[in-house]
Image (tube, grey):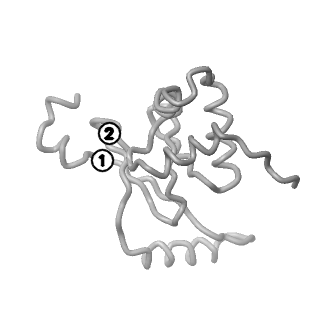
Amino acid sequence: MAALKYSRQRESIKKYLASTTEHPTADMVYLHIKEEFPNISLGTVYRNLNLLSDIGEAIKITTPDGGDRFDGNVAPHNHFYCEGCRRVLDLKMDMGPLKELNASAQQTFDGLIESSSVLFFGKCQNCLKHPSENQ
């Protein structure tokens, strides 16, 4: 594959993703990047987010509400989707059981499983404490 041409806009998107734990949508990234690049289009943001995801410099998280979220932390980890407020949160957990899950899946798959990504669902602590605010 040919070397990727440098883009200040792409670099800014990557830097923004690395600076937040909010797992923003493309629209959220667009609103942030537009401050630095007023003429950037939403399409350019989408293309760059998908490119960063394709080349392994970001993670795309598809959520049940129809929107993709993006994560600049590409280290192996899993996510939690709150069905109340629709936030995506990182799960901090021992990867041991997930390694076992990968190994178990490998036994039933005629190919090579190198990693996995799990999206857990439920309600975050804030939604449990204040259910009427997040309906």
User: Quarter of the image containing the N terminus?
Assistant: bottom right
**Res. 74 image quadrant:** bottom right
Secondary structure beneath dot 2 equals: loop
Tell which residue pokes out farthest to the right in this image: 2
Q: Where is residue 63 in the image (x, y as percent from the top left)?
A: 47, 40
Instruction: Choose between 56 and 11: the one closer to the eye.
Output: 11
Q: Position of residue 62 (x, y in %)?
A: 52, 42
User: Quarter of the image containing the C terminus?
Assistant: top left
- Give, as a three-letter code, the residue at label 1: Gly
Q: How crowded is mark 2: few (under 14 residues within 10 Å), some or many (20 or more)?
A: some
Q: How many numbered markers are drawn? A: 2
- Give, as a three-letter code, the residue at label 2: Glu
Q: Which of marks 2 and 1 is nearer the N terminus?
A: 2
Instruction: Choose between 123 and 15: the one closer to the eye.
Output: 15
Name the residue carrying label 2.
83
Left or right relative to 15: residue 108: right
Name the residue carrying label 1.
122
Secondary structure beneath dot 1 equals: strand
Query: Which residue occupies 66% across, 38% down?
Result: 48
Q: How crowded is mark 1: few (under 14 residues within 10 Å), some or many (20 or more)?
A: few
Query: Which residue occupies 56% across, 51% down?
Result: 59
Left or right relative to 79: residue 131: left
Relative to 48, say whether 111 is above or below: below
Q: Do the residues labelled 2 and 1 touch (CB within 8 Å)?
A: yes
Real-space Cα separation, disc 2 to disc 1, in angstroms: 6 Å
Q: Check residue 27 in the rendering and tell me which mark sits there, or answer none.
A: none
Instruction: Choose between 21 and 133: the one closer to the eye.
Output: 21
Instruction: Choose between 81 and 72: the one closer to the eye.
Output: 72
Query: Which residue occupies 56% across, 72% down?
Result: 102
Q: Position of residue 29 (x, y in %)?
A: 50, 34
Left or right relative to 21: residue 57: right
Q: Where is residue 2 in the image (x, y as percent from the top left)?
A: 88, 52
